[in-house]
Image (cartoon, helix red, strand yellow):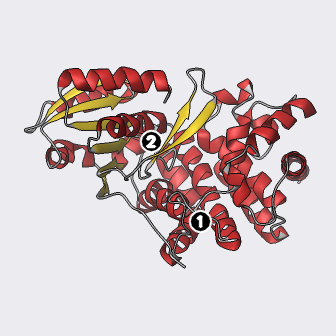
Amino acid sequence: MITTSIFPSRYVQGADALALLPEEARRLGDTALAVVDPMVLPALGAIAQQGTIVIALDRFGGECSDEEIARLITRARDLDANVIIGAGGGKALDTAKAVAHALSLPVVVVPTLASTDAPCSALSVIYTAEGAFKRYLVLPRNPDLVLVDSQIIAQAPVRFLVSGMGDALSTWFEAEDCKASGAGNMTGRPGGMTALGLARLCYDTLLADGIAARRACAARMVTPELERVIEANTLLSGLGFESGGLSGAHAIHNGLTVLEPTHAYWHGEKVAIGTLALLMLTNRPATVVAEAFAFCEAVGLPTTLADIGLDKVSDDELRRVAEMACAPGETIHNIKGGVTPDRVMAALKAADAEGHRRRDRHAAE
């Protein structure tokens, strides 16, 4: 059997690593368009004036949509840019990757949050202008450089780090599903033992260091535990999902985006619900289910539908979620034995009931 694993070309992480951006980006070109989340414009603006590369800053519009990508393609052409930089959260990074792909240019990814596993991947998730999932854009190569300044990430609200842990939590379970079914990863071929090993390391790191990393981020301190969780959220989760494969957690996330109340919640928060539902859907052992729920409770991830704005969700609405999750081509079909919308609805309800049961039990203790 042929297996394939894929990786970014270069990964740099550490406190104050942003200062290395001009030096690192200059290896790839001399004129860059930087797609920048508004909250990090000041920090990047100071760095952009240094070094021998011209970096033109452009404020990211907020959604990785076809409209935003088209706008930035025009901007890059006007600048005659030969490098694209994305700086900010997952949607800004995905937008930069899509623009670079359209123009056949190298891309530098500077995540300023450890909130998703998007930075390292050869993938952009495209949404509508209103924020609903639209499609995956599978790219021909991974980023040329991923540069992570852990000091910047430590200054962000802790919710972002926790959301990243929610995204990373799915990595091992989805890779395990793909291994069991023989499903392909993002290349269309199965991943090798490296992918599965990295996915497991991601999960083990979260369990070992997640609580301490959350405390460090809340105190705005860079500690070894925080560094390891940043790496798990960003590199290990990215390599694990891309080379190990996706299954139901991300498909259920995509289904949840059809309900407007969930748009106020972060990607990883919805993926966490998708993961808990996936454990029900695939009949994982009770000890595994309990471990995942306990981790979510300990770090502050959602464990009920109400936690992502769906406290009054109807069966008709859950049916829409389930049908979207089971759409043709969705990754939920990587689960061995097949999945139906009815089973997804039942799994969502079972996970929600378990979340409420555990919460009621804790309240009574």
220 shown above or below 226 = above
At which x and y percent is residue 197?
A: 53, 74
Mark 2 secondary-structure assignment = loop
Q: Tell me where residue 312 appears, x and y as whole percent.
A: 88, 28
Q: What residue is at 53 percent from the left and 70 percent from the top?
A: 191
The residue nearer to you, when weighing 138 against 116, is 138
Foreground residue, 265 or 248? 248
Labels 1 and 2: the sequence-earlier one: 2
The quadrant the C terminus occupies is bottom right
Residue at figure coordinates x 68%, y 57% from the top left? 247
Residue displayed at 28% across by 31% down: 34
Position of 231 with respect to 199 (left or right) is left
Q: Answer left or right for 285 relative to 116.
A: right
* Residue 146 against residue 191 in the figure, above or below: above
Please name the amino acid that badge 2 sits on.
Leu
Instruction: Locate residue 221, reporting x and y percent.
Output: 41, 49
**Is 297 above or below relative to 94?**
below
Structural crowding at the residue carrying mark 1, measured as other residues with C-alpha within 10 Å and reported as few (<14), some (14–19) or many (≥20): many
- Is disc 1 in contact with disc 2, using a CB cutoff of under 8 Å? no
Residue at the disc numbered 1: 203
Q: Quadrant of the N terminus?
A: bottom right
Q: Which residue is mark 2?
A: 113
Query: Residue type at mark 1?
Result: Tyr
Secondary structure under tag 1 reads helix
Vertical placement of residue 58 versus 156, above or below? above
Instruction: Tell me how far mark 1 sits from mark 2, CA to CA.
Output: 19 Å
